[in-house]
Each structure stands twice: as structure tokens, then as C-alpha cells.
Image (cartoon, rainbow, N blue to C red):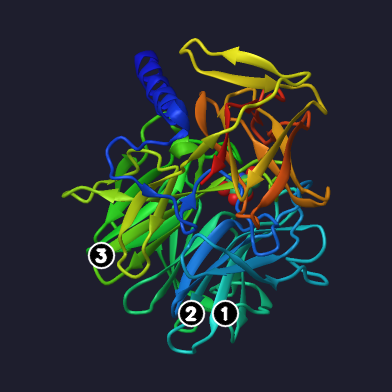
Amino acid sequence: MRLFRLLLLKRILVIGLLSVASGKEEHLSFRAVPVAATAIHSGVPWYDQHHQAVSARGAGLIQEGNRFYLFGEFKRDHGNAFVGFSCYSSADLATWIFESIALPVQPEGPLGPDRVGERPKVMKNPRTGEFVMFMHTDNAAYKDQAVGYATSPSITGPYTFHGPLLFAGQPVKKWDMGVFQDDDGSGYLITHSGNLYALSDDYKSVARQLVKDMTPHCEAPAIFKREGLYYWLGSGLTAWERNDNHYFTAISLAGPWQDRGLFAPQGTLTWNSQTTFVLPVTGSETTTYLFLGDRWAHPRQNSAATYVWQPLQFDADGRLSLPEFHQSWNLDTRTGRWAPVSLRGKLLNIPPAEGWTPHTDAAGVTDLRSKVKGATLTLPFTGTQVAIHGVARSDGGFGEIQIKDHTGKVVLTSIVETYCLYPEASLKFLSPRLPPGDYTLTVTVLGERFFWQAKRAAYGSSDDFVSVQKILLVD
Ligand code: DGJ
């Protein structure tokens, strides 16, 4: 196990080191193409048309015509209270438009003030044409869980909340949940601990239970189907801390389900994410199965949590894997094909700054670090886009990134986190493309860290370090 961890660490640091060389990112086994505006970048905040963080955590994704609609938890940076489910849309799965708060806080009831609302998922009912949203509702202590539902005639809402989804007249008292629509339009609900339910024809109640308590160790469930085989993904139970997620397969939804183990290399903690959904993206040439994971950043779940979206791989036996982390890649939604992309640009010199010290790992990886609350790194640049790489470690914390234009006006404020249970050198921030001009970039240490006190354990970082490894002026 120790040897494996060392090998994994070496592999992760080597990927990081290669990325440092000459200011370019190189992918080892794939043809690299120039970065496009349409690349999917995992592990960095995304921005909408207003330069606000795309806040759709625990999300689900559906395609309607030529657009993709992302529904998720619209978060705040402090506290877990439900503040609404957001809806964003995109044609390329990379550029996101904020559409609406599709379901806002209700005046009272399961999604009223000071309640919890999580993991919204939307399906279009083929019989009624209605959009039906499912979600986890709860009280602030997570002790009043139920699956609820809401409906809307239009995809972006507003959705009308109807309360708990009933099964034989009783609420389905589960927390983490997901949904699945089979080829024939039948709808299914899956929940933590391995429960699978068939929905009624109108999706507004549960018709029958197909699988009961299959595994006690499963949260964040997601189901999809490929070539006649059903896949059921789920995480371990570590609250918002990352863990190695696992999967099951079956040729019938009723089972038997076979435990197939992990789908990302052990110890990568599912490349630092928790499953939320899988969307098959079918084009004229092939289908790419898009894995959606959350990289939580409690308590800064609005600004600093990020998305880990990766192309799932399959072997001839249907074995599922995410063998390597694709930092940046694009998915051609016309053909269904995906390819890695490279972030190219010029390395900027980082001037010395008070409170920041050079750091070298045992493996020789160097970066600048600071945990001094308020310490800043300031760098002028002329161009349109900057990228910051850092080394995430178990003592990493939150940093604020600010970009001002030549008049001193703030054009972007963003929060990044550099926390990971193993040292991981990667892209931590990528600005939106700005109008060509003169700008000033400032990184400020917030003196805060990822932390979550769960029922059974405390999770999170041991310190507040912010890491900057290199800053790139993107071409
Ligand atoms: C883990 C779940 O997967 C999340 O959706 C969230 O409910 C957290 N637990 C809360 O601890």
C-alpha cells in the first residue's frame, strides 16, 4: 500500500512537473490540439456570462434539442441552507449561460427557509411533455430527509414544488439521490445505500421498488446504460471529503448487480471528486459518457467548489475507468468525440512578495506558498486570459483572485482552493477571456481552509496555505 502511494505520488508530481516545463501542458498519450474556448477544464471555477461562479453543485445535466441544461445546488459561501436550484445552459458543455433559479426557496415546507435542498435532477416525461425535477429535501441537521419533486412546462422553469414523492402513500425517506431514464422513457429513482425505484408513468410517484438496501456504503448515486449494460456509480460516506468512488453493473435494473470495484485509480480519490451524474453525449460518430463529479470546498461551496468532468473509458468487458486525469479537453457535441487540449501561453515572472516563501517538495516540486492572512501576490499583465497553477496539499487553504482593468475597476473576483490529501500540481484558476487590455492580477491569502464536521468525523485541511506554482498568459 505504501509502495502504491509512493508510485501514485510520483505519477501525479511527474504530470505536474511536465506541465511546468516551458510553460506548456503536454499530455503524454494523446494528440494535443490548441486550447479552444470550448474546453472543459476540471478543478477550476467556471464563470457564467456575468463573470459569476457557475454554482450548480450536486448537479444533473440533460440535453434538449441542441442545448444542454445543467441543474444544481446554487450555494452560498457560508452555511448549507437551501437558496435555490440553479439552471445554466450551454451548446458546447464548456461555455455556460445562467438561465434562472429554476426552483427558489419556498415560503414554507420541505424547501422553505433554513432547510436543505440537494442534488436536483431533471427528466422530461415523454408521455406528458412535462419537466420533472427530483431532489433531496432535509432539515439543517440532515435528520428529516425525503425525496421531493417539482414540475414545469418549460425546461428552465420556474418549477412548481409538490412536496415529497410518495411510495404507497409514504415519503421516500432517503438523502442522496439520482434519476435515470431508460431507452423506453421509463423513469427511475436511485438513492444512497443502494435503493432503486421505478417511477409511475407520469414520474410523480413511485410505482415499485426494484432494489433494496444493496450496499450500506453508497452515497451520490448515478446510473447510466451503455450497450445493454447498466452502470451504478456511488461514493463512500465521507460527507464532503473526497473518497475512492466505486461501481456496480447489471444487465437488468432489478439486478443482480455485480460489484466491479473502483473506476478511478485507488488513492486518487476519484481524481478528487464525488459522483453526481453521467450523461451519454451521442454524436454522429460515437458516444462519450461524460462523468460529472463535485470537488466540494466546504464552506466556500459557491465560489471555490469545482467540477471534475471527465470522459469515461470502457474496455471490451465493459470495465469502466478514469485512468488519467484530463485537466482540459473538449467534447465535440456534433460527433460525440472527445480530445485533450493544451493550455499554451507565456510564463509570467512572479515578483517577490512579502509573506510568500519558495517551497520544494521531497520530489523536487517547487512553488510559492503562504498562509499569512492578507498576504498578496500582484502581477500586471497585458492580454486576455491568465492561468494559475498551484500544488494542492493536505494543508492547503483558500485564496482570493482579483483582476482589475487599467482604470482600477474590478472585473473578476474568484476564490480558489489548494487542498488535496496528496500533493497534486495542477491548474487552479483560469480567468474568463477578457477584452484585450492591461490588467492587474492579485492573489490574496484568505487564512481559511476546507473544513467539515460530520457526524462521525471531522474532514478537511490542516492549514491555510495557498500555493502558486506558475502564472501563464494564455495565447
Ligand atoms: C454527502 C452527500 O453526498 C452530499 O450531497 C451532502 O449531503 C453531504 N454528504 C453532507 O454532509
Q: Amino acid at mark 1?
A: Ile
Distance of label 3 from label 2 (alpha carbons): 23 Å
Q: Is label 1 in a helix, a strand or a loop?
A: loop
Residue denoted by label 1: 155
Marks 1/3 in contact by CB < 8 Å: the verdict is no
Q: Under 8 Å from ligand 1: the CB of mark 3?
A: no
Q: Which mark is residue 124?
A: 2
Residue name at image x 69 percent, y 30 percent: 397
Q: Dot 2: few (<14), some (14–19), or many (≥20) neighbours within 10 Å?
A: many
Distance of label 2 from label 1 (alpha carbons): 8 Å
| Foreground disc of the pair 2, 1 | 1
| Foreground disc of the pair 1, 3 | 3
Which of the 4 quarters of the picture holds residue 464? Answer: top right
Q: Dot 3: few (<14), some (14–19), or many (≥20) neighbours within 10 Å?
A: some
The N terminus lies in quadrant: top left
| Foreground disc of the pair 3, 2 | 3
- Residue sticking out furthest to the top: 362
Work out whether 97 lies above or below 77: below
Work out whether 174 lies above or below 61: above
Marks 2/1 in contact by CB < 8 Å: the verdict is yes
| Label 2 vs 1, first from the N-terminus | 2
Work out whether 143 lies above or below 150: above
Give how far across and how far down residue 448 sits, in percent.
76, 31
Q: Amino acid at mark 2?
A: Lys
Q: Is label 2 in a helix, a strand or a loop?
A: strand
Left/right of residue 468 with respect to residue 344 in the rendered view: right
Q: Can I make out residue 352 in this image?
A: yes
| Label 1 vs 3, first from the N-terminus | 1
Q: Is label 3 in a helix, a strand or a loop?
A: loop
Residue denoted by label 3: 286
Work out whether 249 lies above or below 252: above
